[in-house]
Amino acid sequence: GSVVPEVVLKVTKYLEDNFEQKLTLDNLAQSFFIAKTTLIYNFKKYLGCSPMDFLLNTRLTKAKEMLATRKLSVGEIADRCGFSSANYFGLIFKQKEGLSPLNYRKLQKTKT
């Protein structure tokens, strides 16, 4: 495939390292001295998703790890993964995973 531009790699690394913070497209564009449209274009072209989708997926991945391995409440996990609220986290989680965070946790317990 095509080589992913350096800026996309830098931004993905930054998102993975700072997923728990309140990040916006504006912040990212400013931090990396790149136009928002260019950033979105490059993400869609090379990763098939927008920077904010990438961030959301990173947050969900981290949240799933925490649900499976830690005894934190769903609210605490939502907070630590950068979601604005436990309700919002629950909503997004259910949309993407097809079940609630608590049911996901229960499923993980039955697997071990």
Image (cartoon, helix red, strand yellow):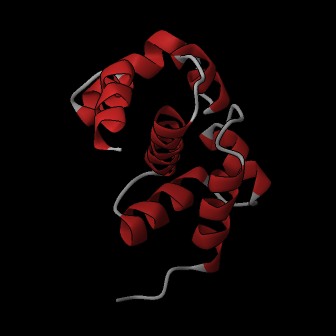
Q: Is residue 33 above or below residue 67?
A: below
Question: Going 72% across and 35% down the picture, which residue do you hit?
Answer: 21
Asked if residue 59 lies left or right of residue 7, the reply is left
Image quadrant in which you'd find residue 94: top left
Residue 36 vs residue 112, the one in the foreground: 112
View extreme (left): residue: 98
Q: Is residue 29 above or below residue 77?
A: below
Q: Is residue 34 above or below residue 72?
A: below
Question: Going 65% across and 63% down the picture, which residue do you hit?
Answer: 13
Question: Going 70% across and 53% down the picture, which residue do you hit?
Answer: 17
Residue 78 vs residue 52, the one in the foreground: 78
Point out the image quarter for the C terminus.
top left
Residue 57: x and y in percent read 44, 46
Residue 38: x and y in percent read 54, 61
Residue 110 vs residue 43, the one in the foreground: 110
Q: Number of numbered discs present?
A: 0
Q: Is residue 108 above or below residue 28?
A: above
Residue 67: x and y in percent read 48, 32
Asked if residue 22 lies left or right of residue 38, the reply is right
Question: Going 34% across and 62% down the picture, which residue do you hit?
Answer: 48
Asked if residue 15 lies left or right of residue 108, the reply is right
Residue 1: x and y in percent read 34, 89
